[in-house]
Image: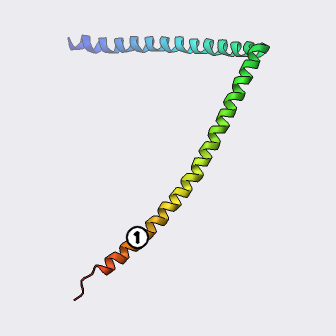
Amino acid sequence: MREIVEVWIPAARAIAVRWGKKREDLFANQLVRYSKSQRTLLFKRAALPDDSKVDCKLFDEHHEDYKNMLGEARNALVIMIDYVVRLEANREVIAGKLVGFKGSNKRIP
């Protein structure tokens, strides 16, 4: 019984490996065909003037939106830096007050 199992497992594994390689080849071929068809569609779409105008308009709109978002992010960064500087200054003031408070809170012998 053990010999049958030992023989069967490598055979089953070989079949699984062969099947996996076939699937890999199939998916690789599908990917190549899909990328070629997408590239062809992209070039066809670029050749059509109406679609090209629509794409350019969408690109310009998105470009403007991204420029606005970048400006907002830069403004937020400047505000954040000022906020951090104020927090550090407040922390130093509070630390000074705490040292003064601890100094005045000592017992007098």
Q: Assign a secondary structure to mark 1.
A: helix
Q: Is residue 5 above or below residue 78?
A: above
Position of the C terminus, as image quadrant, is bottom left
Q: Residue at position x 24%, y 13% from top?
A: 3
Q: Is residue 103 above or below residue 58?
A: below
**44 or 4: nearer the viewer:** 44
Q: Position of residue 78 (x, y in %)?
A: 59, 52
Image-quadrant location for residue 72:
top right
Q: Residues within 10 Å of mark 1 (few under 14, many from 20)?
A: few
Q: Residue at position x 63%, y 16% from top?
A: 35
Image-quadrant location for residue 96:
bottom left
* Circle count: 1
**53 or 23: nearer the viewer:** 53
Q: Residue at position x 24%, y 87% from top?
A: 108
Q: Position of residue 101 (x, y in %)?
A: 34, 76
Side of 107 relative to 50 (left or right): left
Side of 54 relative to 101 (left or right): right
Side of 90 relative to 2 (left or right): right
Residue found farthest to the bottom? 109
Q: Position of residue 80 (x, y in %)?
A: 54, 52
- Label 1 belongs to which residue? 95
Disc 1 marks a residue whose amino acid type is Ala
Q: Residue at position x 39%, y 13% from top?
A: 16
